[in-house]
Every structure is written in structure tokens, then in C-alpha cells.
Image: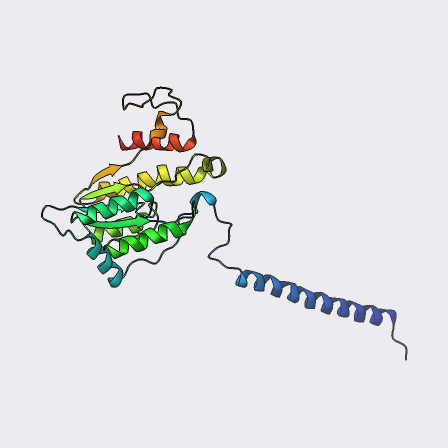
Amino acid sequence: MEKSPFVHNRLRWHSSLAKLTFWSFIFLGLILIFFFRSPSSNPLPQDPSRRSLRTYNWGGPAWEKRVRSSARVRSHNGISVLVTGAAGFVGTHVSAALKRRGDGVLGLDNFNDYYDPSLKRARQALLERSGVFIVEGDINDSALLRKLFEVVAFTHVMHLAAQAGVRYAMENPGSYVHSNIAGLVSLLEVCKSANPQPAIVWASSSSVYGLNTKVPFSEKDRTDQPASLYAATKKAGEEIAH
């Protein structure tokens, strides 16, 4: 007995529905696999202006012991100093000099790759041999800064950390704002809340004299004609500190 056209159409409809359901499940499964396998910790490309702000391993009894030991004052009337940018050229020499005279010294540096990080690592090793521990972290990491002040009652802060260089500001201006302005404000806010409040020594730059033609510079010269973004951020730091 021949099947009616209605039966044939119904069979074709059921077959098409089954195929549609099958491929819908396949498509849904691929979507679920994509979302579950995508790394949730780094869904977006890194913002170059924040490249120095990474997640570092800090905290814990062993870490706190190293922090306290490094910052321990070893001379009569000595001071306890947090040196930011301690792995830089100036920061290394300042940290070593303070340590030699018996002050407690703790370094902080983000070890960014503006120039060859191996130079900073070599300086870190040099300071380690003299008893100075450098905490690896960013001055914009307020939680880390607060923790350091909880562990050690610093009497002084030597703030040398900054994004340096004139030409690089044309490539990555955000890094200068991030480090030299936002970072300074973050540090000042934590120092403001610390008890006791530490004295702060902050390094500006001769670049703030900008387009002045007078040589040599004087502290009384104008500083409102910066010739670079770097100079402008350092001048902004002067005004913020004031």
C-alpha cells in the first residue's frame, strides 16, 4: 500500500526537526566549551599604562619576618626608611648608604621592563647581601602599602619610584600618569593615614625647568614651561606634594 503524500511530508518534517535539534545542541555545546575554557583572569589585553601593576606574592609570616628584619634600626637614633624605586640606580645607592649608617631600610620596586630588568635584579642581589630586602610591588597597590605600614612603623619614606625618560612618553604617556601622578597620590594617602605619620623625601627633576635658557638653573627659576610629559608629571608632583 503506497504511503500518502501527507505521510511523506510528515516524515520529512520529523527528519528536518531532528537535524535542526542535533545541530542546535552541537552549536550550544561549542558556545559552552568556549566560555568555560576562556581564561577569566585575563580576558582583556593588558593596558600598557598599567603594565607595572602586577599581582605579586606578598604576605605571610616568612615575608613579614624579612620585612621587619630589613627595616630594623641598628644604630642609636637611627631611622626606619621605606625606599621606593630601590632597585634603580639612585635608589640602590641611597638604600646602601642608609643601611651602612645603621638605619632600617626596606625597598620597594616593581622591576618593570622600561630598561633591562637584569640590571635591577643585580642591584637587588647587591642590596640583599647588605641586608636590604626589596619588596616586589607597585606604588599604586594601596593594599600592599598599607600592609607594609602595618608591619613596620616607618619614620621616613624616600620616594624615588617614577617612570623616567622623555622619549618614551610619546609611546606610552599613560605609564607616566600612572606612576608619577597616581602613584605619588597613592603613596601620600597611605602615609597620611599611617600612625605615626612618616616624613617624606621626594625626588623631583631638573626637567621641570623646561624651556628655560638660563644656565645654571636656580631653584627660583620658573617651572611652568615643561618641555616633555615627563617634566609635566614631575612638576605636577611638586604641586601635589605642596
Give x and y (percent) for residue 56. Answer: 36, 56
Residue farthest to the left? Answer: 76
Residue farthest to the right? Answer: 1
Residue at 34% x, 41% y: name it. Answer: 183
On-image quarter of the N terminus: bottom right
- The answer to whether one can see residue 136 in this image is no
On-image quarter of the C terminus: top left
Residue at 69% x, 66% y: name it. Answer: 23
Give x and y (percent) for residue 197. Answer: 18, 42
Picture quadrant where residue 93 is located: top left
Please state which of residues 27 and 73 is positioned toward the viewer in this rendering: 73
Give x and y (percent) for residue 32. Answer: 57, 63
- The answer to whether one can see residue 174 in this image is yes
Give x and y (percent) for residue 220. Answer: 27, 21
Please state which of residues 88 and 186 is positioned toward the viewer in this rendering: 88
**Vertical placement of residue 62 versus 115, above or below:** below
